[in-house]
DNA sequence: AACGCCGGTTTCGCCTTGCGGAATTCCGTT
DNA sequence: AACGGAATTCCGCAAGGCGAAACCGGCGTT
């Protein structure tokens, strides 16, 4: 009765637990231990353990009064985040290409990670001087324009939490003083865009703006990055204003009401 | 270095694999084996196995060209199904309560399972004669008005597949003849509602209508159930027409264009 | 062109720890 | 109060998960 001679690297407990998760999900609603056990032909004890584990991980939810399980918050959170990311990327891409042509510099899109920003898309200018990120890379919040744009628009509590984390020093110019950072963030909130000059990567600068979801929460950020020598302050300001325009458009499509730019 | 003295029933491999899944999800995008391994402090080999397993189960997707992993179809399918169910239930509930008051009988909402319908909500009439289902119960498609309503509006291929499964005989009146069932389903498609008289439960009857999603696919069904003695054919017809009205309203809110009722 | 580094894949044997039968407790019924 | 079904808990066995280390393949370097 060999089941899956396929991949020798599949870990059985994991696979079976995923089947349990899947069953609970497909069932549409609250389902009891015994039902899962019978359906999947997995002994009650084992099923019990999987349900417990999935629940502990937040993928399932255990209703103590009915003693039944259904989908948990973790799964929904993941799904929501994924959908949100896909949507942002989809909405942003055309605008990013347009921006790249306008400024002939690399345009980046990133989402908020945990204390970091994670690049989820980028459109590179075909200039010989290289870009600095790859999709999937994550950089600190406080040393990037992307991160600063997000931080500035975060609710106070959450921003404090982010800034309480140890701040890594990426270059000699990286901001590390709490006061200085907060001062800049207030300025960012006023102007609607953030800039970073050699604070994340020597010789490189970046101008970034936040993208807000339907709740007005900054879930992502858009930026233009360039070698410091190619982007003087005056041009950076112009880029910031243009980026802000584009980001507001994307935010609106995500369902965000105007809000921004106090 | 005891990690979680918490729940002794947590299965470690499962828990760790879920952490991997979560990390990949939170990361926002394609992530490589080594990165996951480092981030989670899980040895490369083990991480590799989890990634393989998650991929085999469809929860992750392995991009062979970049050798990186991201969220897979299974997770999205689950999330979508869940969202869809929540939405249907949410949209249907007020109308169900209204219907319950109009007819003073129990109103049921079910989604299509695999060869079955699964009750996801019901509003009971407070009459002493009992209802027959509980949320989470699943009944055969062919013996319930809910199932017949769904079957009638399924694409031909899928309907055939359903009817090829062995048909259980719930009562003496349960339809088992392929021809007879198909004749009824054609009738259901014409009238827009299905009826069932003691075919699922002795002495009980049910009138059901399909709810269509944005693709015109019958994802759920709405029904009124009652003791046979309280619901003569004339009243059943009236209920069917009313149900149809309500279901079309819900379907429309789900994004379905009129379509139905040929 | 050979080298070496950096991932990813495979092997292999130890021994953790997951497994499931059976006993137990907990409820909701009769 | 006793019954029946479901969820928990216990416990000993050995399945099978683990991870160090070896292997491989590709890419950038010398």
Image (cartoon, coloured by chain):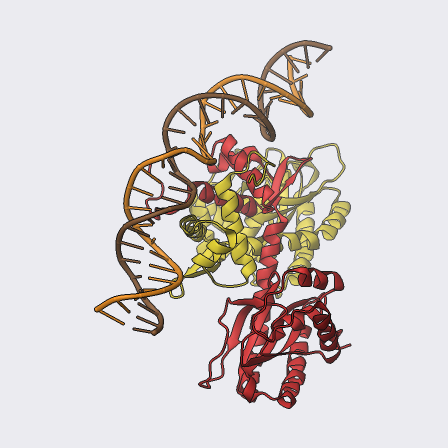
Chain colours: A yellow, B red, C brown, D orange
Residue A129: image location, x then y, percent? 71, 32
Q: Position of residue A40 (x, y in %)?
A: 51, 52
**With respect to residue B123, does B10 lie above or below?**
above
Give how far across and how far down residue B174 sits, in percent: 61, 73
- Res A94 seen here: yes
Q: Tell me the residue at 74%/64% (across/down).
A: B155
Question: Eyeballing the image, is A260 above or below A178?
Answer: below
Q: Is residue A238 left or right of residue A8?
A: right
Q: Is residue A171 left or right of residue B221?
A: left
Residue placed most toward the observer, B229 or C3:
B229
At x 56% / y 39%, what residue is drawn?
Answer: A2
Say above or below: A252 vs A54.
below
Image coordinates for residue A48, horizontal then vertical, percent: 41, 52
A217 sits to left or right of B185: left
Using the image as rendered, state which of residue C21 and residue B120 is in the foreground.
C21
Q: Is residue A262 visible?
A: no
Q: Residue at x 55, y 88 (%)?
A: B230
On the rendered image, what quadrant is the N terminus of chain B found in? top left
The residue sitting at the front extreme is B172
Q: How many marks?
A: 0
Q: Quadrant of the C terminus of chain B?
A: bottom right
Residue placed most toward the observer, C20 or A237: C20
Choose between B195 and C27: the one closer to the eye. B195
């Amino acid at each position: 009765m060999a089941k899956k001679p396929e991949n020798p690297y599949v870990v059985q407990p994991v696979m079976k637990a995923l089947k349990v998760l899947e069953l609970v999900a497909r069932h549409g609603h609250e389902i009891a231990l015994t039902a899962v056990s019978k359906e999947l032909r997995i002994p009650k004890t084992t099923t019990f353990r999987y349900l417990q584990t999935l629940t502990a991980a937040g993928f399932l939810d255990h209703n103590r009064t009915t003693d039944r399980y259904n989908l948990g918050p973790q799964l929904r959170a993941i799904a929501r985040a994924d959908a949100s990311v896909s949507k942002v990327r989809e909405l942003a891409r055309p605008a990013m290409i347009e921006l790249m042509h306008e400024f002939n510099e690399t345009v980046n899109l990133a989402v908020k990670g945990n204390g970091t920003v994670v690049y989820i898309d980028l459109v590179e200018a075909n200039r010989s001087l290289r870009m600095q990120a790859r999709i999937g890379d994550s950089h600190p919040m406080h040393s990037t324009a992307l991160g600063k744009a997000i931080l500035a628009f975060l609710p106070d509590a959450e921003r404090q939490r982010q800034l309480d984390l140890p701040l890594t020093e990426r270059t000699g110019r990286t901001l590390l003083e709490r006061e200085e950072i907060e001062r800049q963030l207030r300025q960012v909130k006023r102007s609607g865009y953030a800039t970073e000059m050699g604070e994340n990567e020597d010789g490189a600068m970046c101008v970034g703006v936040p993208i807000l979801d339907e709740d007005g929460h900054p879930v992502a950020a858009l930026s233009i990055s360039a070698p410091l020598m190619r982007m003087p302050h005056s041009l950076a300001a112009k880029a910031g204003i243009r980026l802000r325009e584009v980001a507001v458009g994307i935010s609106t499509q995500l369902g965000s009401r105007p809000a921004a730019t106090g």
